[in-house]
Amino acid sequence: MITGYFYSDTVARHKEKQQIEKIFYLIVEANILFFIWNIALNVLRRENIVAYIRSIFTGKNIIEFLALNESPLAGHLWYLGAILYVLVIVLLMDEFNCRKILCCLTLVLLIVDLVFGKYSLLIFHREFPYILVRNFLCVGIPYFCIGNLIREKRYSEKWNKKVLQILIVAFAITTLAERFALVNAGLNATRDHYISTTFLAICLFVYILKSNWHNKGLAMIGRKYSTWLYIIHPIFITVFSTVVGKLGLKSIYRYVAPIVVYCATLVFLIILQKVKIAMKSK
């Protein structure tokens, strides 16, 4: 949604291809990082490294990586592949002046995500691999288009803040209600995308735009560190989970884990940037 919202600026600066190139290099760097990290974990655990490498470079993994954005090295890296594909598709559609087709497909793709994702047990009485819907097609394109439409149609100017506050609370409640109902019926399929998720995301997004906050600290974190916060945070999750497990602090840690991981990752990135600056100055 954020990428779609700011895409008009990217087009105005004629930096579409530069943005695609940047994401491509991020994918390469992130996958190399997690390849090294996983090798290091295998060494520490005294597991067979050769067997691990063979398990990564299989035909199935390569197809899933290329077609469905699923990285065999770290599951969360699907997002980088998805946004890369979306940007390439949008660029091609713009070449033929037919981006409206993607906007028309948005609702269909969101429904496909729900039908074969969270509600698959209810509809088909079976679960499908979540990577079939958690990819550039069923998540990337529709949410990019939603963000782009919010910008171009200026919805943030039209909606009332108080109404948005009510809707945020309402959709938060309905999301919990969906989960409660599906769990109690034994139909809560793998996936974290409910019917209310899209509505909640839109209302939150527009509400933040209307709030017109000017927090330089948060803006700086978002601009400088958000990408690598996303990429490397699972490393800190693994490290802290291992440490607290050995210290017997799991019961306490689970309540503060997100905050601890976020702060530790951010501090690490800030220190790393300062070290780079110091090295360059020398």
Image (cartoon, grey):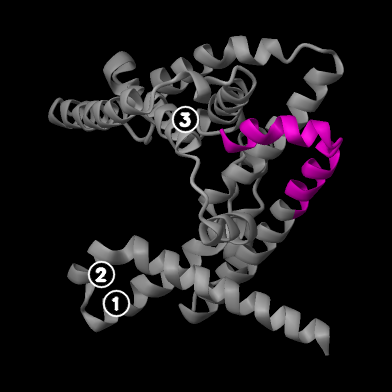
Q: Earlier in the sequence, mark 2 or mark 3?
A: 3
Q: At 36% from the left edge and 75% from the top edge, which residue is drawn?
A: 242
Q: Mark 3 points at which residue?
A: 206
Say which amino acid is labelled 2: Tyr
Q: At 68% from the left edge and 31% from the top edge, which residue is drawn?
A: 86
In the structure shown, which secondary structural element does the residue marked by tag 2 occupy? helix
Q: At 32% from the left edge and 23% from the top edge, which residue is drawn?
A: 163
Q: Earlier in the sequence, mark 1 or mark 3?
A: 3
Foreground: 252 or 199?
A: 199
Q: Name the residue under label 2.
A: 253
For mark 3, does the 10 Å Cα neighbourhood hold few (<14), some (14 to 19), or many (20 or more) residues? many
Residue 19, magenta (yes or no): yes
Of badges 1 and 3, the one in the foreground is 3
Q: Please give the range of residues in magenta.
A: 1-25
In the structure shown, which secondary structural element does the residue marked by tag 1 occupy? helix
Q: Residue 244 carries which label?
A: 1
User: What separation in Å lies between label 2 and label 3 (alpha carbons)?
Assistant: 33 Å
x then y, percent, for residue 184 = 13, 29
Of badges 1 and 2, the one in the foreground is 2
x then y, percent, for residue 55 = 58, 56
Q: Which of marks 1 and 2 is nearer the N terminus?
A: 1
